[in-house]
Image (spheres, rainbow, N blue to C red):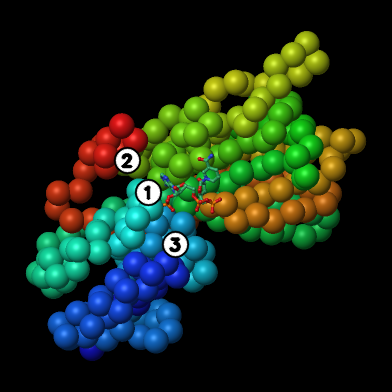
Amino acid sequence: MRRINVFANKTPLSVETERLLKCKLENSGFVVPKEFDSEAELIICIGGDGAFLKTLHEYDFPDIPFIGINTGHLGFFQELNPDGLDEFIFRYKKGKYGIQPLKTVRAIVSVGNEKFEHKGLNEIVIKGNHSHSIHLNMSIGDSFIERFSGDGILVATPAGSTAYNYALGGSIVDPRLELLQITPIAPMNTTAYRSFTSSVLLPPNLSVKINPEEFINTGVLISQDGMEKRYGQVSEIFIEFSDSVVKLLRFENYDFWNKVKSKFL
Ligand code: NAP
């Protein structure tokens, strides 16, 4: 039997859409498991981008295609609206769709002898704890680049370029390009501190190494797609593309730049 996982957030429209969708899928011969099924052929997320990101993290970036149904949010990742369920099932059964592969970013955080991994589809953000400014020595590849001082540093994937990165003045990147974008968050530029004030773009084979300044290290906050974790004494944060690729199901008329226009202009 063909199985499809369905997840929804708790808004009334999402709950109603979930109920309707489950009925329609079952009437069309699909099984909707009660719990996450790692052998399912598709994951449908009902809600906004936030609901999609939450599901992605909860099930640790599964290798199953996703499609989103937008129930009144920005819905940049979402492909469908609640009034398009019948057409979706019709087109899906006919195989009239493509897969958009999205690269993810990972950070390895070293604390003493321990290492912690964080992964993001949108971005990894490094900030100081409790609104303190943060001082970070940053290297790109083997070259030391700068001693950053400010609120923090964001490393965005192309998929995440339209999210927090864009709000910070970063560039929108077509996800067919493979690059990481480092965007400063409120960098200080004074006679005391000098930091890049614009985003810099890196090819996929270059990594970023960040060492928080030892003597003024009051703790580090790491955020992966908005999910935060706080650390005490961090010696190093290593950031690069991760091997996980998120697969989004897109219909034939999907066009990244039309989506950008419809959501931002
Ligand atoms: P959230 O409330 O879940 O999301 C904030 C907004 O960002 C929502 O409108 C969300 O869309 C939208 N969004 C998420 N991913 C996007 C993408 N790839 N392209 C365009 N818009 C996108 O906030 P959160 O839980 O703190 O963090 C989730 C994400 O929100 C983070 O990964 C971060 O990129 C973004 N964020 C943005 C800002 C900002 O713009 N100043 C600040 C913090 C976080 P939906 O309405 O469809 O959920």
**Label 3 CB-ligand 1 distance < 8 A:** yes
Q: Position of residue 102 (x, y in %)?
A: 37, 51
Q: Position of residue 237 (x, y in %)?
A: 69, 45
216 displayed left or right of 169: right
Q: Mark 3, residues whose alpha carbon is within 10 Å: few (<14), some, or many (≥20)?
A: some
Residue extending farthest right: 215
Disc nearer the start of the sequence (1/2)? 1
| Point 58% across, 46% down: residue | 124
Label 1, label 3: how far apart the Cα atoms are: 11 Å
Locate residue 142 relative to residue 217 in the image: left or right.
left
Q: Is residue 223 left or right of residue 169?
A: right
Q: Is mark 1 within 8 Å of ligand 1?
A: yes
Q: Residues within 10 Å of mark 2 (few under 14, many from 20)?
A: few
* Quadrant of the drawing holding the C terminus: top left
Q: Residue furthest front?
A: 12
User: Residue 36 at x, y = what percent?
Assistant: 43, 80
Question: Can you identify the residue that label 2 sits on?
Answer: 263
Q: Nearer the viewer, residue 149 or 132?
A: 132
**Residue at mark 2: C-beta within 8 A of ligand 1:** yes
Amino acid carrying mark 3 in the image? Ala
Element on which disc 1 rests: loop
What distance separates the C-alpha of mark 1 from that of mark 2?
7 Å
Residue sitting at x 38%, y 35%: 173
Residue indicated by mark 1: 74
Q: Which residue has dot 3 on it?
A: 51
Ranked by sequence position, the earlier of labels 1 and 3 is 3
Quick check: 55 above or below 110?
Answer: below
Residue visible at 81% across and 46% down? Answer: 219
**Hey, which residue is sitting farthest top in the picture?**
191
Is there any visible trace of residue 220 in the rendered image?
yes
Q: CA distance from mark 2 to mark 3?
A: 18 Å
Report if the CB atoms under discs 2 and 3 are less than 8 Å apart: no
